[in-house]
Image (cartoon, grey):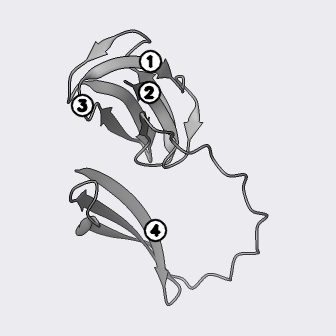
């Protein structure tokens, strides 16, 4: 279970929505809206089309993916370290909130793919565990 933040614009009004992602890895996740906050009530002009951003590196097999886009606040493990399921691997910061990334299973850290201060995209590999 993890929280995901989304921004939606409906009829010119922008809302920040925090969604709790539930469900197993093979199931389509169910979503539960935890909070909604209005960002602006004034209609906004359509944003100009931006050039597509380069694709962020996606997590490979064995990589623990980032659950959201943010900045790596700390890497809490090192290569060669043994971890148990539930051990904290990385702390991310997004929107002035910390998000902890935990080991989904026991194993040994084979690669650390990010460093403190680095910006990451949702789905980007953070740490590899074998």
Return the disc, 3 or 4, that comes first in the chain's sequence: 4
Return the disc, 2 or 4, that comes first in the chain's sequence: 4
Q: Residue at x 43, y 21 (%)?
A: 75
Q: Quadrant of the C terminus?
A: top left
**Marks 2/3: CA–CA distance:** 12 Å
Give the left or right position of residue 48, taking residue 110 as reference: right
The crowding category of the residue bearing disc 3, from other C-alpha atoms within 10 Å (few below 14, some 14 to 19, many at least 20), is: few
Q: Residue at x 46, y 38 (%)?
A: 61
Return the disc, 1 or 3, that comes first in the chain's sequence: 3
Query: Circle 2 sits on which residue?
Result: 128
Q: Residue at x 32, y 62 (%)?
A: 18
Q: Say whether marks 1 and 2 touch (CB < 8 Å).
A: yes
**Marks 1/2: CA–CA distance:** 5 Å
Query: Circle 4 sits on which residue?
Result: 7
Judge whether 83 appears above or below 24 on screen: above
Q: Position of residue 2 (x, y in %)?
A: 27, 50
Q: Secondary structure at mark 3?
A: loop
Return the disc, 4 or 1, that comes first in the chain's sequence: 4
Query: Circle 1 sits on which residue?
Result: 110
**Marks 1/3: CA–CA distance:** 14 Å
**Marks 3/4: CA–CA distance:** 31 Å
């Amino acid at each position: 279970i993890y929280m995901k933040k989304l921004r939606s614009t409906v009829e010119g009004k922008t809302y920040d929505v925090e969604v709790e992602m539930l469900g197993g890895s093979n199931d389509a996740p169910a979503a539960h809206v935890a909070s909604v906050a209005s960002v602006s009530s004034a209609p906004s002009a359509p944003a100009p089309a931006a050039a597509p951003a380069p694709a962020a590196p996606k997590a490979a097999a064995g990589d623990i993916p980032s659950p959201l886009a943010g900045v790596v606040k700390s890497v809490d493990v090192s290569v060669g370290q043994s971890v148990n399921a539930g051990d904290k691997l990385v702390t991310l910061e997004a929107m002035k909130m910390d998000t902890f990334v935990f080991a989904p299973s026991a194993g040994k850290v084979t690669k650390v793919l990010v460093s403190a201060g680095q910006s990451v995209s949702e789905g980007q590999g953070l740490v590899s565990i074998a």
